[in-house]
Image (cartoon, rainbow, N blue to C red):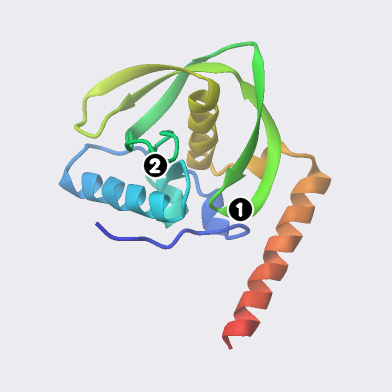
Amino acid sequence: MALRPIITAPDSRLKVISTPVERVDDDLRALMDDMLETMYAAPGIGLAAIQVGVPKRVIVMDLAPEGELPEPRYFVNPVIEWTSEDLARYEEGCLSVPEFYEDVERPARCHVRYLGYDGTEQLLEAEGLLATCLQHEMDHLEGVLFIDHLSRLKRDMILRKLKKSKRHDATAEA
């Protein structure tokens, strides 16, 4: 397993629509293992492959509370088959939009069909934080960031601050 660099906004690679995975094999499992290690090190609770520069429809996640045993989850080619009409609002953050958190409203529940770590098809009925996290990470597969759900004013402000931070970091390294 290896840590991979996480791409941060406004990098245009985050806007790429990810392609379906043809099969779950050892190479894909190695990618998922790397993604999980990268997510834990960041630290975060979810990571899409595009965030480490791989435009494949792959997500890893672990919502276990801090101090409890890890509960890694793997989602290959996830598809939302149903969402509830009722909505839930969560304060979201993102490893690709570091240090920014905003409330986002999404369907409170969803059903997701996907392939697991071993390649078997599964159906998950999700609610609460799991539903929110799945929808957030699946947005990444479509080139959508959580800030795209915000007003244009808030989104532009965050992107300006991220660009300024990147310039400052580049100047400090020189």
**Residue ranking furthest to the top:** 85
Observer-nearest of 15 and 146: 146
**Image quarter of residue 157:** bottom right
Residue 152 in view = yes
**What x and y, as percent, mark residue 96?**
55, 53
Instruction: Give the quarter of the image for residue 118.
Output: top left
Q: Is residue 23 above or below residue 126?
A: below
Local SS, label 2: loop
Label 2 belongs to which residue? Answer: 19
* Residue at the (46%, 51%) spot, across then down: 43
34 vs 80: above or below:
below
Q: In this rendering, would 32 be left or right of 38? A: left
Disc with the residue nearer the chain's start (2 vs 1):
2
The spot of residue 137 in percent (x, y) is 49, 37
Find numbered disc 1 in the image and state the secondary structure of the residue it sits on: strand
Q: Where on the picture, by quarter, is residue 171?
A: bottom right
Q: Residues within 10 Å of mark 2 (few under 14, many from 20)?
A: some
Q: Measure the C-alpha gap from mark 2 to mark 1.
A: 22 Å
The amino acid type, in three-letter code, at marker 2 is Thr
Is residue 35 rendered to the left or right of residue 173? left
Circle 1 sits on which residue?
97
On screen, residue 127 versus residue 123, left or right, reads right
Work out which quarter of the rendered image holds the C terminus and state it: bottom right
Name which residue lies at 54% across and 21% down: 128
Q: Residue at x 83, y 47 (%)?
A: 153
- Can residue 145 be seen at all in this image of the molecule? no
